[in-house]
Amino acid sequence: MDLRSRFTAELKTAMLARDAATTGTLRMITAKLKDTDIAARPGPPIEEPAIVAMLRGMAKSRRESVELYRQGGREELAAKEEAEIAVIESFLPAQMDEAGLQAAVAAAVAETGAATIKDMGKVMAALKAKHSASLDMAKAGPAVKAALGG
């Protein structure tokens, strides 16, 4: 089942269960998806990788909000954002663990023939091409830098 269908099915389930938090989050996701589709016009609607990237961006902005709410002593708002993060992340593919990240970085370094920190861009591009769905690029950067001796 593609992500668009999953959003619709999960929204119906949440509405029938009268789960207000999940319903609100799913409505927010579908609204953001619709906005993104409209921005992509006159071309076709966005594809799965772009939807995953959109979801990652939404989760990232909510993590930043949680941090700010906690600094401001607004624990109830932080809890609400964390509930939204949980719903958003349920649609994301599983993230690669630390051992998998190191193996992917080593393979990308070998594949690109990278030797110095100047080749970091090539390695990052290779990682993004092969593992964009399951790899957090923010964690990959420091791992590539360490592998290249930077």
Image: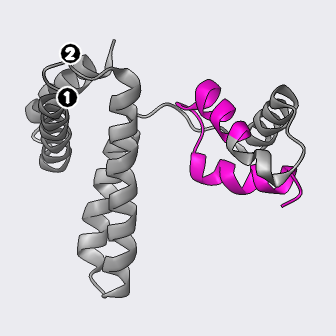
Number of numbered markers = 2
Figure quadrant of residue 28:
top left
Please determine whether, in this image, residue 84 is positioned above or below residue 46.
below
Q: Helix or strand or loop: what does disc 2 sit on?
A: loop
- In depth, the one of 6 and 137 nearer the eye is 137
**Are the residues at dot 1 and dot 2 in contact (C-beta closer than 8 Å)?**
yes
Please determine whether, in this image, residue 85 is positioned above or below residue 73.
above
Q: Which residue lies furthest to the front in this view?
A: 118
- Magenta part of the protein: which range? 122-150
Residue at image position (67%, 52%) is: 141
Where residue 17 sits: x, y (%)? 13, 35
Q: In screen coordinates, is 36 left or right of 93?
A: left
Q: Does the magenta stretch include residue 125?
A: yes
Please determine whether, in this image, residue 81 is positioned above or below residue 107.
below
Q: In screen coordinates, is 70 left or right of 12?
A: right
> Which residue position is annotated with label 2?
44
Callout 1 amino acid: Ala
Q: Helix or strand or loop: what does disc 1 sit on?
A: loop
